[in-house]
Image: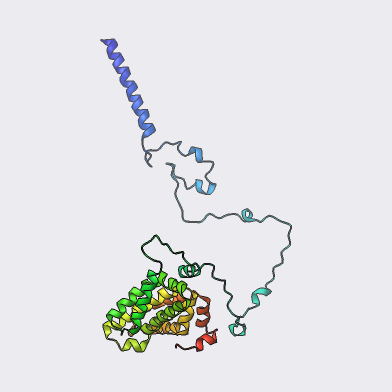
């Protein structure tokens, strides 16, 4: 019995020593309970100015004061080069007078890519005799819509037909031009005339309030579709003074012109200014086009 009791006492002592060592190793640090040797290995790295600010527990007290550095730490090495500092350039003022400059013509780059309309216009499609639908169906439908719009009066039905016409411009107009150059030019002139009619202020004022806004919006959307065809159509719109009309719409006050229409006009104006001929007209450099009037 004594032997067993002695063994139990020894085992209990071993377990208690293991628990003490475990608590010593894995107990979280705190200012009250922290090992004394925790920061001993970093004492060599702590500067002398900060070593005095270290507490007994091993924690450093932070200070907002800046640490002064010696000027010797920032001395530049001698490179052997002689520098001459002159303050004369600081007293010289450079003035620029824009009226003394000579404005020359714009230097533009040629358009590298053709529009889908111009690509189809330059390449005649081969007839597909196996298909039920002929390549001239779109051109014939567009021609019928144009002839119908020329004789009809402005109404809601006329506006709906004009919206359908804007969706038939490609590839119908190119197919008309490939079939007959004269017929293609006449159709293009009529479409551009529809644009100028919808944007004409005298025509809009004659319509009732629900119709006049729709006519103006339809004309702006049709103008955007026509501009996307290529530079040839843009030249026709310039001759019909569409650019000046767009500038008038944008410059009007919000009380007279809704913001939605002004934003749509700005979108059409930006698309039109992508072409160099429109930019020169906008800046007033092309006097011949600026003096031309709509037929």
- Nearest the camera: 285 or 12? 285
Q: Is residue 229 visible?
A: no
Count of labels shown? Answer: 0
Q: Nearer the viewer, residue 5 or 128?
A: 128
Q: Nearer the viewer, residue 75 or 142?
A: 142
**Coordinates of residue 62 in the picture (x, y in percent):** 45, 51
Residue occupying image coordinates x 44% and y 36%: 36
**Rendered residue at 37%/28% (across/down):** 21
Q: Position of residue 19 (x, y in %)?
A: 34, 27
Is 17 situated left or right of 72 in this image? left
Looking at the picture, the colour scheme in use is: rainbow
Residue 244 on image: x %, y %: 44, 84
Q: Position of residue 243 (x, y in %)?
A: 45, 82
Q: Quadrant of the N terminus?
A: top left
Residue 16 in view, yes or no: yes
Question: Where is residue 10, by image quadrant?
Answer: top left
Image quadrant in which the C terminus is located: bottom left
In the depicted view, which residue is nearer to us: 141 or 240? 141
Whether residue 167 is situated above or below residue 68 in the rendered picture: below
């Amino acid at each position: 019995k004594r032997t067993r009791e002695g063994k139990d006492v020894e085992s209990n002592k071993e377990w208690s020593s293991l628990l003490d060592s475990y608590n010593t190793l894995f107990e979280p640090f705190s200012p009250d309970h922290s090992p004394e040797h925790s920061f001993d290995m970093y004492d060599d790295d702590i500067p002398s100015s900060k070593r005095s600010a270290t507490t007994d527990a091993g924690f450093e007290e932070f200070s907002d004061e800046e640490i002064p550095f010696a000027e010797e730490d920032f001395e530049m090495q001698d490179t052997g080069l002689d520098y001459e500092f002159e303050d004369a350039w600081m007293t010289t003022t450079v003035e620029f007078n824009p009226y003394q400059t000579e404005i020359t013509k714009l230097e533009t780059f040629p358009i590298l890519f053709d529009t889908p309309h111009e690509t189809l216009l330059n390449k005649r499609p081969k007839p597909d005799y196996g298909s039920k639908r002929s390549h001239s169906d779109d051109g014939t439908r567009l021609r019928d819509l144009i002839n119908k719009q020329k004789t009809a009066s402005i109404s809601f039905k006329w506006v709906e037909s004009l919206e359908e016409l804007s969706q038939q411009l490609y590839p119908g107009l190119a197919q008309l031009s490939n079939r007959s150059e004269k017929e293609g030019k006449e159709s293009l002139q009529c479409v551009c005339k529809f644009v100028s009619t919808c944007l004409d202020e005298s025509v809009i004022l004659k319509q009732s309030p629900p119709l006049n806004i729709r006519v103006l919006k339809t004309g702006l959307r049709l103008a955007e579709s026509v501009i996307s065809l290529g530079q040839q159509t843009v030249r026709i719109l310039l001759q019909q003074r569409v650019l000046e009309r767009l500038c008038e719409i944008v410059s009007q006050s919000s009380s007279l012109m809704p913001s939605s229409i002004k934003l749509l006009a700005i979108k059409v104006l930006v698309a039109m200014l992508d072409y160099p001929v429109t930019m020169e007209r906008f800046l007033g450099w092309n006097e011949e086009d600026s003096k031309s009037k709509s037929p």
